[in-house]
Amino acid sequence: MRSDLIAAGNDPLVSNRSGGAPNTVISPSLLFGELEVKRADTSKDKLPQYPAPPLSGIDGGWQGASESLGLRIAKKERQASRNK
């Protein structure tokens, strides 16, 4: 324990954490005379780089679906212009 601890409260804080192994931390409020704070190392917080998934799949993917939709719209527009 730190030597410059001034007081400890009687209001325990319960923190349930899940991760590699779930755990629970229970601690009271603490008052220190002096406290040094360091910036957290966030280099490990970055997600790994993965390539984008391919756009085509079993059914032709979004490209095939958008082409099909475009053809249907064009067909309806032609039919509408013929009916005028």
Image (tube, helix red, strand yellow):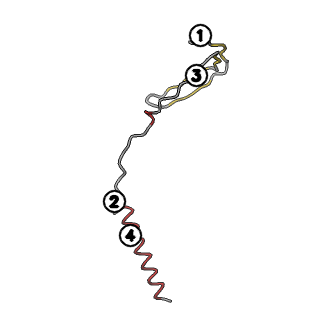
Q: Are the two marked residues, 4 and 2, in contact with CB atoms closer than 8 angstroms? A: no
Of callouts 1 and 2, the N-terminal one: 1
Residue for badge 3? 26
Of callouts 3 and 1, the N-terminal one: 1
Numbered disc in front, either 4 or 1: 1
Q: Which of 32 and 16 is in front in this view?
A: 32
Residue for badge 4? 67
Type of amino acid under label 2: Ser
Numbered disc in front, either 3 or 4: 4
Residue for badge 1? 3
* CA gap, disc 4 and disc 1: 71 Å
Of callouts 4 and 1, the N-terminal one: 1
Of callouts 4 and 2, the N-terminal one: 2
Q: Within 10 angstroms of label 1, few (less than 14), some, or many (20 or more) residues?
A: few
Q: Is mark 3 on a helix, strand or loop?
A: strand
Numbered disc in front, either 2 or 3: 2
Q: Is mark 2 on a helix, strand or loop?
A: loop
In the shown orientation, is residue 43 left or right of residue 11?
Answer: left
Type of amino acid under label 3: Ile
| Quarter-of-image position of residue 59 | bottom left
Q: Which of 13 and 43 is in front in this view?
A: 43
Q: Within 10 angstroms of label 2, few (less than 14), some, or many (20 or more) residues?
A: few
Q: Which residue is drawn at 67% across and 18% down?
A: 10
* CA gap, disc 1 and disc 2: 63 Å
Q: Which residue is drawn at 42% across and 40% down?
A: 47
Q: Is mark 4 on a helix, strand or loop?
A: helix
Residue for badge 2? 56
Q: Within 10 angstroms of label 3, few (less than 14), some, or many (20 or more) residues?
A: few
Q: Which residue is drawn at 59% across and 26% down?
A: 14
